[in-house]
Image: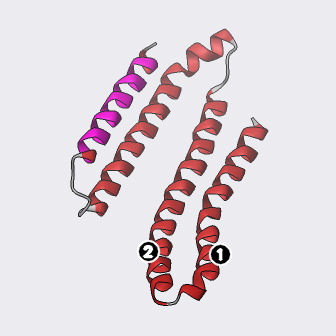
Amino acid sequence: MMGLALLVIVCVATVTVGFRLLRRPPSAPRKILAAAVTAGFVAMATALVTILLEAPAMAATGAATASSGMGFIGASLATGMACLGAGIAVAMVGAAALGTVAEKPELLGTTLIYLGLAEGIAIYGVIVSLLILGRL
């Protein structure tokens, strides 16, 4: 029960940070990214502490073990970090592609291929997380 309260507190704090970041001007994307990553790491640390605190109670009731909880954290990390990397890649490739298409419109197809490759990073993360979940 204590773990659930801890998770609720972290979720509320993360949402609060998100709303404060919405009011910031987009001129500081690195600060926004750093705050989002920090909030994510705090949420992951809280989930880890929750799993460790709730493990004896779960083992006594025959529920999922702490190792399966770590598997869930691993699967969420695989998807989350891959999507974060894909977002950064699409932002950089998309900006360059837009500049290229503005100068040479005949290169639109090539730039779309590059954007698709950047988006593929997120799909790899989802596949890895599905493989992790399949072993639990």
Q: Residue at x 59, y 80 (%)?
A: 108
Depth check, front residue: 66 or 29: 29
Q: Residue furthest right?
A: 134
How far, Cα to Cα, is label 2 from label 1?
14 Å
Counting residues from the N terminus, which is met first, the one under dot 2 or under dot 1? 2
User: Colour scheme of this structure image?
Assistant: secondary structure
Residue 121 location, x and y as percent?
A: 62, 62
Pointer 2 local density, CA inside 10 Å: few below 14, some 14–19, many at least 20 = few
Q: Amino acid at mark 1?
A: Ile
Q: Which residues are magenta?
A: 4-21
- Looking at the image, is 91 positioned above or below residue 99? above
Residue 97 location, x and y as percent?
A: 50, 78
Please name the residue that numbered disc 1 is placed on: 113
Depth check, front residue: 78 or 49: 78
Q: Residue furthest front?
A: 105
Say whether residue 75 is left or right of residue 51.
right
Residue 9, magenta (yes or no) = yes
Depth check, front residue: 50 or 25: 25
Magenta stretch, overall SS: helix
Please name the residue that numbered disc 2 is placed on: 95
Say which element carries label 1.
helix
